[in-house]
Image (tube, helix red, strand yellow):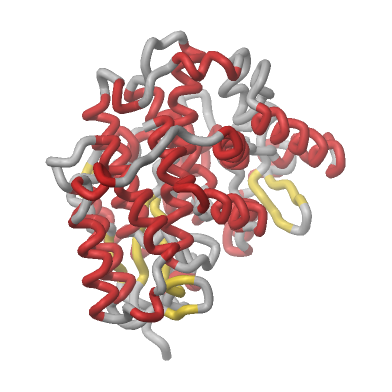
Amino acid sequence: MTLPLPILMLPVATQRYSCHGCGNCCRDFTVQLRDADLAKLRAQGWEERLGMPVTTEFRGTTYLRQREDGACVFLMEDGLCRIHREHGFAEKPVACQLFPFVLVPDDVRTHVGISFACQSVRENKGAELRSHLQEVDRMSRGVPETRVATYSALLSDAMSAKDGELDALRMSLDRMLAREDIVLRDRFDGLAWIAASLGKAKLAEVRANRFGELVAALAGAVPAELEHIQLGPALPKQLRLLRQAAYARLEDVQVNQAKSRGRWRTVLAQLLASRAFTRGKGRAPSVARGLLDGLDFAAIASVPTLSESPDRDAIDQLLSRYARATLLGNRGWGAGYYGWPAVRGLQALVLNIACTAWLARALAAKRGHAAATIDDVRDALGRIDRHAGRAPWLGSVGERLRLEFFRLDDGLRRITRESI
C-alpha cells in the first residue's frame, strides 16, 4: 500500500486565514462535482425537497447548479450554505470544503497553497495557516490524486530540474520579496528582471549548485542593478497585449449563460470582447459580472501607478504576500500551473501581477478615485488570481505566445513598471 505524500503547509508566516462567511465564493464560482459529491447530494434528497435539479451538466462535466445571478442554489440570504447548515461542513462538495486551499503535489510532498480569490485571504484575516493542517489533511483524502507523487517541474523548456534547483529558486525569490528595504516598484521590477534574465540565460551551463548561486546573485542584485539598465516606457504593442492578457483573466462565462447562449454565440462574444480590450478605446465591454461596466479605457491613463498611491505600503505588503504564497505554495509552475516549467511559470506570475496592477487602476478610474486604493488592488487581485492554474486558456499556446512576445524589448519589465 502506497502511503500518501506528506503535507507541507504554506510557509508564509505573515499569511493568515479563517472563513468569515462572506459568501463571495458561493456567488462567484462554478463548482465541479466528483462522484462522491453526487452521491452525497442524492443521499441528502435535495431534488425532492427543493423540487428542482441541484446539478447541471455542461460538455460532459457535472456542476452545482447556479441561479440566474450566478449564485449557488444552496446559498441562503444570510450568506451561509444550506448544505453546511443542515448536514455539516464535511457533507459539502469537496471543492467547497477545500477553498481557498490549493493542494499541489510534486515528487516528494503535497504543497498547500492558498487562493487570493478569497476575500479573507486578501485581507489577511484569521488564524495562522498551520492551525488548518489537520483539517486540510482530512479534506485531501477526498481528492486522493493530490496526495500521490507527480513529476518534478521542468526548470525550463525541455530541461528537467535537478535536485534542489526549484527550492533554490523559491528561496532566493522569497528572500527578495520579503525584504523591507526594497520599495514597491523596485520589488516587482526586480522580479520581472529576474524572470526575464533566466529566460535569456544558458541554463544548461549552470546546473545544480551553480544554478542556486545564479539565482541568489540575481535576487541579491535587486534593486542596485536595476539602476544601471536603461528602460523606456511600455511600447504600444506591449500595452495592447497587456490588456488582452487582463481580459483573458477576467473572462468568466457562467455555465447557465453558456448553455442558454449556445457555444458559437458565446465564442463570438468572447472574441469581440477580447478585441475591444486589445484596442483599448471607447467603453469597456461587460466582463466579470459588470466589474468595469461604464468605464472608458481612456480614463485609466489618468490614474497614477500603484507606487504613487497613498496606500502603497499596504499594496506592497499585499502583492508581496501574494507572490510569496504563489511560489512557496507551488502554484507558480509544474502541477500547480498547467505543467509549465519554472522559468515560464515565473514569467506568468509577473504577468499576473502586471494585470492586477492594470485592473486596479481601471477600477480606480471607474470608481472616481484619484489613485488606486488598497481596496482597488484587493478587488483586482481577487479577480486575477481567481483563474490562475484553473482556466485552461491561461495554459494555452496563445498565452505562451504572449509571454514569448513580452520577453522581447524588456516587455515584462516595461508592462510591470507601467502600472506599478
Q: Position of residue 329 (x, y in %)?
A: 34, 59
The answer to which quarter of the image holds residue 166 is bottom left
Q: In which quarter of the view is residue 307 placed?
A: top left
Q: Quadrant of residue 220?
A: bottom left
Q: Quadrant of the C terminus?
A: top left
Choose between 413 and 377: the one closer to the eye. Answer: 413
Q: Residue at x 58, y 21 (%)?
A: 292
Instruction: Return the x and y of residue 1 as percentages of the image width and height.
Output: 42, 91
Residue 125, can we see it?
no
Say whether residue 56 is left or right of residue 234. Answer: right
Of residues 147 and 236, which is closer to you in this image? 236
Image coordinates for residue 283, horizontal then vertical, percent? 66, 17
Give the image location of residue 413, x and y in percent.
Answer: 41, 44
Q: Locate residue 14 relative to residue 149 in the image: left or right.
A: left
Tell me what residue is drawn at x 50 percent, y 43 percent: 386
Residue drawn at x 30%, y 33% is: 123
